[in-house]
Image (cartoon, rainbow, N blue to C red):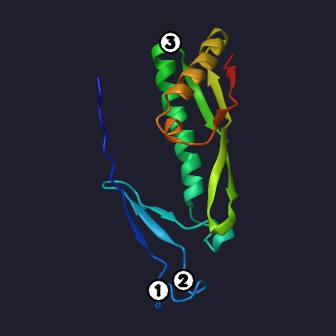
């Protein structure tokens, strides 16, 4: 069965200081990301590229997308495997390299999920659910760079 889903967002550059992009240092890299019915996300470029450090940058949003996609698929896998997850946290990290000519690319994202399950006998199943989530994650399957996960699963008791 083939299903297709569509997603729409709107992006508005908010960094015009009055003269547009006439000078490299004369404009802000700020933008607002919007999706219908949802809170706006205030973004900018990475501070290394003259961005606002108080706003999310595209690289962080990519890492966050991978982290949240893995978590959601993992929770689904656990629910169908009879694993009761009581807490989930991830400290994900991404590495980007700049290339000659001003470009660049992500080279790797590593997820570090820390999961607490209800019972000790659920730990092994939870670890298997991480593997299944990794294979099925929509966002990770769309990337041309490695996405790894180094999960820690512990029981509540």
Q: Say which quarter of the image contains residue 59.
A: bottom right
For marks 1 and 2, give the CA distance.
Answer: 6 Å
- Looking at the rendered image, the quarter that the C terminus falls into is top right
State the separation of the CA atoms marked 2 and 3: 53 Å
Q: Circle 2 is placed at which residue position? A: 27
> Residue 101 sits in which quadrant?
bottom right
Sequence order check: which comes first, mark 1 or mark 3? Answer: 1
Q: Position of residue 25 (x, y in %)?
A: 61, 85
Quick check: marks 1 and 3 in contact, CB under 8 Å?
A: no
Looking at the image, is 95 positioned above or below residue 41? Answer: above
Percent position (x, y) of residue 141? 51, 35
Q: Secondary structure at mark 1?
A: loop
Q: Quadrant of residue 36?
A: bottom left
Q: Which residue is mark 3?
A: 82
How many C-alpha atoms fall within 10 Å of the one at disc 2: few (<14), some, or many (≥20)? some
Few, some or many C-alpha atoms within 10 Å of disc 1 (few <14, some 14-19, many ≥20)? Answer: few
Is label 3 in a helix, a strand or a loop?
Answer: loop
Residue 2 vertical placement versus 22 (above, below)? above
Above or below — where is 23 with respect to 85?
A: below
- Do labels 1 and 2 touch, CB within 8 Å? yes
In terms of sequence position, does the residue under pointer 1 or pointer 2 come before the other?
1
Q: Position of residue 119 (x, y in %)?
A: 63, 13
**Residue mark closest to the camera, 2 vs 3:** 2
Q: How packed is label 3: few (under 14 Cα within 10 Å), some, or many (20 or more)? A: few
Counting residues from the start of the chain, the first of labels 2 and 3 encountered is 2
Q: Which residue does the image show at 30% across and 36% down from the upper left?
A: 4
Q: Which residue is identified by label 1?
A: 20
Residue 13 visible in the current orientation: yes
Which label sits in the foreground, 1 or 3?
A: 1
Gap between marks 1 and 3, in whole Å? 56 Å
How far from the left and from the top, in percent, is residue 11? Answer: 40, 65
Q: Judge whether residue 92 can be spotted in this image.
A: no
């Amino acid at each position: 069965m083939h299903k297709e889903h569509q997603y729409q967002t709107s992006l508005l550059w908010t960094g015009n200081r009055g003269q547009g992009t006439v000078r490299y240092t004369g404009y802000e890299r700020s933008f607002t990301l919007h999706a219908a019915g949802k809170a706006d996300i205030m973004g900018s470029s990475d501070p290394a590229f003259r961005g606002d450090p108080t706003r999310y940058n595209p690289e962080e949003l990519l890492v966050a997308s991978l982290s949240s996609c893995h978590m959601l698929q993992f929770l689904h896998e656990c629910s169908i495997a009879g694993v009761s997850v009581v807490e989930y946290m991830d400290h994900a990290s991404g590495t980007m390299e700049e290339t000659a000519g001003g470009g660049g690319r992500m080279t790797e994202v590593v997820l570090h999920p820390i999961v607490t399950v209800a019972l000790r006998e659920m730990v092994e199943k939870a670890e298997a659910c991480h593997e299944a989530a990794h294979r099925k994650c929509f966002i990770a399957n769309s990337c041309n760079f490695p996405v790894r996960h180094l999960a820690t699963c512990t029981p509540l008791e």
